[in-house]
Image: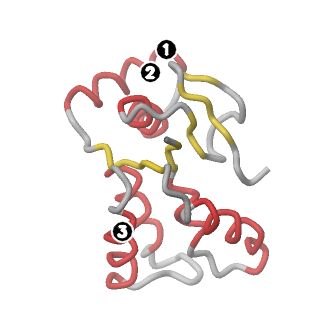
Amino acid sequence: MRFVDTNVLLYAVSTAAAEAPKRRTARGILEGEDLALSVQVLQEFYCQATRPSRTGRLTHQDASALVESWMRFPAQETTASLLLAALESCRRHRLSYWDAAVIEAARLMGCRTLLSEDLADGRVYRGVKVENPFR
């Protein structure tokens, strides 16, 4: 399975003309059946997609409906063991907690690939390789 980071979800709903190629890529990714994500990723999506300062912001109803639709993919819950693993990854790789938690969620889900533009493309963290689908 491939793990989807928040930026893939956000590009899928972007209305910005400059992001049209990324929107097409993100929507294509989300048509896959081999995807996983985490509750954290869904929370981040909702918060960013409904942010008042966001161009093309979504309503609560629209963002909630998308979150529910993406629950068709396996979703890693936030647990105490995930928290501890993320803290260790923060220390080991000098990452923000949020990036480390995404990596550890992907690892716990058994994903070998993390689709994200937020981390170094090609870098491997504890068996999870980052792939930037937008490059």
Q: Is residue 63 left or right of residue 115?
A: left
State the residue position of label 2. 89
Residue found at x 55% / y 65%? 31
* Amino acid at pointer 2: Ser
Q: Quadrant of residue 105?
A: top left
Residue found at x 55% / y 22%? 125
Q: Tell which tag, 2 or 3, sits nearer the viewer.
A: 3
In front of the other: 50 or 26: 26
Give coordinates of residue 8: x percent, y percent. 58, 58
Residue 118 drawn above or below residue 87: below
State the residue position of label 3. 67
Q: Residues within 10 Å of mark 3 (few under 14, many from 20)?
A: some
Secondary structure at badge 2 equals helix
Q: Residues within 10 Å of mark 2 (few under 14, many from 20)?
A: many
Residue found at x 45% / y 79%? 52
Residue 112 drawn above or below residue 16: above
Give coordinates of residue 30: x percent, y percent. 54, 63
* Amino acid at pointer 3: Val
Q: CA distance from mark 3 to mark 1?
A: 32 Å
Q: Are marks 2 and 1 in contact (CB under 8 Å)?
A: yes
Q: Quadrant of residue 91?
A: top left
Q: Are marks 3 and 1 in contact (CB under 8 Å)?
A: no
